[in-house]
Amino acid sequence: MGKTQLRFPQKGMLKEDILAEMAESQMQDVQWREGKTFSLVYHAGEEVTDLLMSVYILFFSQNALNPTAFPSLRRFETEVVLMAADLLGGDEKVVGNMTSGGTESCLMAVKTARDWFLSRYPEVQKPEIVLPISAHPAFDKAANYFGVKAIRTPVREDLRADVDAVKKAIRPETALIVGSAPCYPHGVVDPIVALGQLAQERNILLHVDACVGGFMLPFVRRLGYPVPDFDFGVPGVTSISADLHKYGYAAKGASLILYRNREIRRHQLFATMDWPGGIYASPTMSGTRPAGPIAASWALMKYLGQEGYLRIVETVMKTTTAIREEVGNMEGVKILGEPEMSLLALASDEVNIYEVGDEMTARGWYLDRQQYPPSLHLTINFAHAGMEESFLQDLADAVKIVRKPSFARVRSNLMLNLAELAVRYLPEGLVSRLTSRASAMLGVKGASLPKRSAAMYGMMGSLPNRGDLKEVVLDLVEQFTTPQD
Ligand SMILES: *Cc1c(COP(=O)(O)O)cnc(C)c1O
C-alpha cells in the first residue's frame, strides 16, 4: 500500500495515475462480489447495480436541501415515502422523510419523541427511552446526542424483548419504547403487538426499528414464512425506520423514517427565522443532501416493483433455509433463537466460536463477531445465493480444525491466560494503562485488524472494567483516521 499522503499536493496528478492508485488501494478491501462478505454490502445483481449507478450519476450534482429548486427530488422522495408506507401497513396519514441511513432515521425517531414528550411535559428534565438490550446502538447515540436517558431492558430466553421488563422500566419520564423488527444481533422480531398495547396504555410513543427488516419481512410473510405483526397495522406503533440501502438494495445513503401522522412528525422538523442568510428550515439532520440516493431509491422501487422484491426475497430465504438446516445438522455449532428472516447468529456450546471465526477469516469469509453470548453474524442477502455449499463446507472444516488442538489456538490461549493473570494480579491502574496500549500490543495498526482475533475478544471479555475497554476502542477509532507509519 502507498504511504499515507500527509500533505495536500501543490501540483495536480493525472487522472489515469489517480485511478490506478485507487484501484490498487481498493484491492485490499473485502471482495464482496465473491459473496463471502456478510453485512456492509447488499447486492441484488449487476442489472440492479447498473440501474442504480446510471440514475445516481443523472442526479449527481443536485441538492435535496431545497425542494423548491428541485421539484423532481421532492416528488421522488415523497413517492418513495408513500410506496414504503404502503408496504409497511400505513394509511394515507403516514408521513416521513428519507435520511442518509438507519442511524439518522433512529436519531430522528428519538429526537422527535423527545420533543413530542417535552411539548406535553415541559417540566421533565431528562426524558427517557426504554429499549431491549438487542436494539441498535444508534439509539444510544441518539440518547447521547440529544440529552435523553436510554434504559436498556433484558431479552427473554428466545432473545426477543421481555415486555414485562419493558413495563417495569417505564416511568413518568418515559417518552418512547423501541422494538426491533428484527434486531440486528440475532435477527428475531420483538413482540411488537404487546409493546404497542403497552405504549397505548401509557400514552407514549413506540418506534419499530425495521431498518434491516422493513424491505424483507413483508415479502417473507407473503412467501408463507411466519412473521409476527410489526408495522403500522399494529395499534400503538407511532414510527418505523426502514433502510433502503440494506434489503431495499438501493445505493448507500438511503433510509426512511416514517410516522403514523403529521402531528408526531412535526416534532422532527427544524426551522430558524433569525439567520442573516435567510429563513432556514430542514426536516432531518443533514443540510445539503445528495440527490443520488433519493433518485436511485425511487428508480429501483419502480424497476423491481413488489414482484421483483418478492423474487429476490425468495432466493434469499432459500439460501438462508439451506444454511439453517445444514447448521442444524452440524455438530458443534448452532443458530441462536428462531430468526424470522435472513440474519443468523452462529454460536457453539462446545468450541470457541471466535476461533471458528478466525478459521473462516482464513478461508476468506467476513463475519462479524458478537458478544453476550459469543457468536458470529450472518446477514444473508442476494449476493450469497449459490454460496451456501462452499460456506457450509468451510464452516464444517473450520469447526473440525478448532476441535483439534493447534499451534494458533495454543498461542491464543496462552495470550488469554497471560491477560487474565495480568488482570487478576496487577493493580487496576496498571491494567488500565496496559489496556490503553492493548491495540498496539495486539498488533492492531491503523485500519487492519489482526487476522486472528479470538485472543483479542477473549482478552477483552476478561477485562474487569468495561471503561478500560471503551478507551481501547476509542483509541482504535482515533487510529482509523490517523496516518499510518
Ligand atoms: C443497520 C441497522 C441500523 C443502523 O443503520 P445504518 O444504515 O448502519 O446507519 C439500525 N438498526 C438496525 C436494526 C440495523 O440493522
Image (cartoon, rainbow, N blue to C red):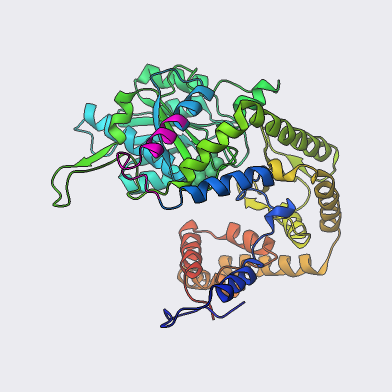
Q: Which quadrant holds the N terminus? A: bottom right
* Image coords of residue 140 (percent x, y): 42, 45
Residue closest to the eye, 287 or 137 = 287
Q: Which quadrant holds the C terminus? A: bottom right
The single residue placed furthest to the front in the displayed view is 58
Residue closest to the eye, 6 or 405 = 6
* Image coords of residue 183 (percent x, y): 56, 37
Reply above or below: 446 against 327. Answer: below
Residue closest to the eye, 27 or 319 = 27
Task: Magenta stretch: give its range.
Answer: 62-79
Count of all numbered marks drawn on residues in the image: 0
Reply above or below: 355 against 480. Answer: above
Q: Is residue 77 magenta?
A: yes
Q: Does the rendering let one see residue 19? A: yes
What residue is at 61 percent from the left and 26 percent from the top? 306
What residue is at 81 percent from the left and 35 percent from the top? 325
* Image coords of residue 55 (percent x, y): 53, 45
What residue is at 86 percent from the left and 59 percent from the top? 404
Q: Is residue 408 left or right of residue 81?
A: right
Image quadrant assignment for residue 418: bottom right
What residue is at 35 percent from the left and 24 percent from the top? 204
* Image coords of residue 85 (percent x, y): 47, 25
Q: Is residue 269 left or right of residue 53?
A: left
Q: Does the rendering let one see residue 134? A: no
